[in-house]
C-alpha cells in the first residue's frame, strides 16, 4: 500500500492481513517518489521505482524485513520496475531514454542488466504504468515475457518475448481498415538549447514523406498538455493525421515535462507560461532553420495545458504565428480556479501559488488579458461537459474577440468532456482543424490541389 503527500507518492507500507498492523518500509522524504513493482516469490523483497537515488526514477529492491534498498539501476533517465520471474532470478524493468522505452532484465544472480531486443518505440510491461501493484509480465513457466509495444507507425499492441530464443512476436494488430503503417511517419529526435541556456531540450520532428527542402512548407509547433507529461516515441493520431496533410511538425518536451529528472520536472513551478513558453518558441525557431519551413507559415497548436500555452504564445509572441489552434484551453487563472475540478486545482495550486500573494503572476500569465495583441487567426475547440477546462474559458475568448473584431472561429461539442471520444466528433474535429490551417497556412501541395 502507499501513502500520498500532495501529488507525490512518497511511502510504501506492508500490512499484516491477519492482525491489521502495518509497517512503513520507506523513510520520510517530502520529495521522494516510491512505487511498487512486484513481490519476490519468497515474499522477502519488493521491486520498486524511486527517485531517491539521484532525482531520476531508478529501480531497486526493497527489503520487507529491514527496509534496505539495493539499487538495480543508476540511470540519468527514468526507469520503471516490473515484477520478478517465477523462479526469482530476474526482475523485469523498462528505461525511458529521451522518450523511447526499452525493456530490460536484471539477473539477480550475476548482477547483470541486459537490454532486450524489442522493436523501437515505447515498450511497457503489464501493470507498470504507475499503478499501485503491478501484474507480472512473466508467463507462469517463466519462458515468456509479455509487453505492450507502441511505436510511431502503429498504436499499442501486445507482444511476447521468448526468453530462450531471444525473439519477440506480435500478438495483436491495432491498425484498422485501410490504414497502412508505411504511410505513418517516423520522427527524428532533435535537441537544442533553451533560450536562457539552462536546459538541453528534446523534441520529436515529423517530416512528410518525400518533402523537398526548399523553405516553402508550413510547420506546426504541437504543444503537449500536462504540463507534467512527456511526448514520447509512440503513435500519435493527431500528429500522423497532420503530417499526412503535408505539415512538418515539431513536438517539444518543454521544461516541466516528465522523463528528465526532478529538476527539469519542477523547473516551471511558479513560472507556468514563462520559461516553458519560451521553450516552445525555441522549438519554433529551431524548426524554421531546418531548410524545410517557411517561417511565415508557423502554426501553434495544443490541447489542455498545451491549449493554454497556445493562447499564451499567440498573445505574447503575436508576430511569430500564421495561425493557432487551441483545444480545451484555459485562459484566465482566476476563473479557471473557480470553474475547474477541485482536484485539478490542487495540482495547479502547487504550480501557481496563492491568487492574492501572486496576483501579478496570475494576471501576467492569463492570456485573456492580452488578447488585443493577438494577430493570428484562431480556432478554439472545447467540450460542453469538460470538468477540467470548462467551456466558459472558451466563451471568454469568443466574447472578447467579438469586441476586438479578431478572426476567431470556435466549436463546442456539447456532449464531450475534456477529450473528444465520439467517432463523429473526432472526424469533425480533424476535418475542421485541417480546413482551418490549410486556409491560413497552406502547404504547397494543398495550394496545388485547390488550384486544380
Image: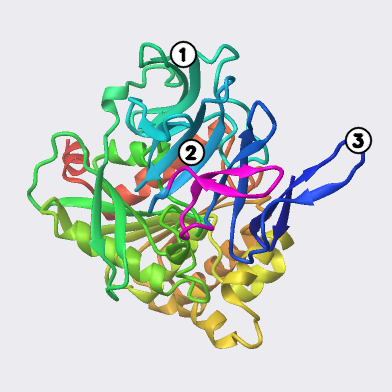
Given contact means CB atoms under 8 Å apart, are the residues at marks 3 and 1 in contact?
A: no
Q: Is residue 87 above or below residue 32?
A: above
Q: Nearer the viewer, residue 58 or 127?
A: 58
State the separation of the CA atoms marked 1 and 2. 32 Å
Say which residue label 1 marks.
171
Q: Nearer the viewer, residue 109 or 361?
A: 109
Q: Please state which of the two labelled residues, at mark 3 or mark 1, is closer to the viewer.
A: 3
Q: Earlier in the sequence, mark 3 or mark 1?
A: 3
Q: Residues within 10 Å of mark 3 (few under 14, many from 20)?
A: few
Given contact means CB atoms under 8 Å apart, are the residues at marks 1 and 2 in contact?
A: no
* Local secondary structure at mark 2: helix
* Local secondary structure at mark 3: loop
State the separation of the CA atoms marked 3 and 1. 41 Å
Q: Residue at x 49, y 82 (%)?
A: 364
Q: On the image, which quarter does residue 446 sit in?
A: top left
Say which residue label 3 marks.
18
Q: Is residue 396 above or below residue 105?
A: below
Q: Position of residue 273 (x, y in %)?
A: 45, 72
Judge whether residue 341 can be spotted in this image. Answer: no
Q: Please state which of the two labelled residues, at mark 1 or mark 2, is closer to the viewer.
A: 1
Q: Position of residue 173 (x, y in %)?
A: 44, 17
Q: Is residue 55 magenta?
A: yes
Residue extent of the magenta highlight? 52-73
Q: Earlier in the sequence, mark 2 or mark 3?
A: 3
Q: Earlier in the sequence, mark 1 or mark 2?
A: 1
Q: Is residue 367 magenta?
A: no
Say which residue label 2 marks.
428
Amino acid at each position: 500500500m502507499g501513502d500520498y503527500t500532495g501529488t507525490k507518492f512518497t511511502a510504501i507500507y506492508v500490512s499484516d492481513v491477519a492482525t491489521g498492523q502495518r509497517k512503513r518500509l520507506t523513510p520520510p522524504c517530502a520529495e521522494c517518489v516510491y512505487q511498487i513493482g512486484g513481490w519476490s516469490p519468497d515474499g522477502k523483497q519488493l521491486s520498486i521505482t524511486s527517485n531517491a537515488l539521484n532525482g531520476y526514477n531508478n529501480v531497486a529492491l526493497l527489503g520487507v524485513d529491514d527496509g534496505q534498498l539495493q539499487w538495480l539501476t543508476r540511470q540519468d533517465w527514468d526507469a520503471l520496475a516490473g515484477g520478478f520471474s517465477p523462479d526469482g532470478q530476474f526482475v523485469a524493468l523498462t528505461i525511458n531514454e529521451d522518450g523511447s522505452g526499452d525493456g530490460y532484465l536484471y539477473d539477480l544472480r550475476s548482477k547483470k542488466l541486459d537490454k532486450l531486443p524489442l522493436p523501437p518505440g515505447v515498450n511497457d510491461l503489464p501493470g507498470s504504468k504507475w499503478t499501485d501493484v503491478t501484474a507480472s509480465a512473466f508467463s507462469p513457466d517463466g519462458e515468456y515475457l509479455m509487453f505492450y509495444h507502441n511505436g510511431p507507425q502503429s498504436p499499442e499492441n501486445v507482444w511476447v518475448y521468448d526468453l530462450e530464443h531471444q525473439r519477440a512476436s506480435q500478438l495483436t494488430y491495432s491498425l484498422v481498415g485501410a490504414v497502412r503503417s508505411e504511410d505513418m511517419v517516423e520522427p527524428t529526435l532533435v535537441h537544442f538549447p533553451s533560450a536562457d541556456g539552462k536546459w538541453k531540450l528534446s523534441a520529436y520532428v515529423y517530416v512528410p514523406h518525400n518533402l523537398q527542402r526548399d523553405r516553402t512548407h508550413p510547420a506546426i509547433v504541437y504543444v503537449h498538455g500536462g504540463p507534467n507529461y512527456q511526448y514520447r516515441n509512440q503513435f500519435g493520431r493527431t500528429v500522423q493525421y497532420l503530417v499526412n496533410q503535408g505539415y512538418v511538425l515539431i513536438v517539444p518536451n518543454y521544461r516541466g515535462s516528465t522523463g528528465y529528472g526532478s529538476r527539469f520536472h519542477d523547473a516551471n513551478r511558479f513560472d507556468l507560461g514563462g520559461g516553458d513558453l519560451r521553450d516552445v518558441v525555441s522549438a519554433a525557431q529551431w524548426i524554421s532553420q531546418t531548410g524545410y519551413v517557411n517561417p511565415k507559415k508557423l502554426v501553434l497548436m495544443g490541447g489542455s495545458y498545451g491549449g493554454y500555452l497556445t493562447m499564451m504564445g499567440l498573445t505574447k509572441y503575436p508576430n511569430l504565428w500564421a495561425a493557432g489552434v487551441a483545444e480545451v484551453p484555459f485562459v484566465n487563472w482566476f476563473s479557471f480556479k473557480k470553474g475547474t475540478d477541485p482536484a485539478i486545482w490542487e495540482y495547479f495550486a502547487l504550480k501557481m501559488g496563492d491568487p492574492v500573494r501572486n496576483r501579478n503572476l496570475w494576471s501576467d500569465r492569463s492570456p485573456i488579458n492580452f488578447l488585443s495583441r493577438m494577430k493570428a487567426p484562431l480556432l478554439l475547440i472545447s467540450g460542453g461537459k469538460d470538468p477540467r477546462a470548462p467551456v466558459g474559458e472558451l466563451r471568454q475568448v469568443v466574447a472578447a474577440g467579438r469586441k476586438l473584431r479578431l478572426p476567431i472561429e470556435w466549436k463546442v461539442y456539447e456532449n464531450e468532456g475534456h477529450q473528444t471520444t465520439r467517432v463523429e466528433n473526432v472526424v469533425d474535429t480533424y476535418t475542421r482543424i485541417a480546413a482551418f490551417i490549410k486556409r491560413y497556412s497552406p502547404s504547397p501541395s494543398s495550394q496545388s490541389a485547390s488550384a486544380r
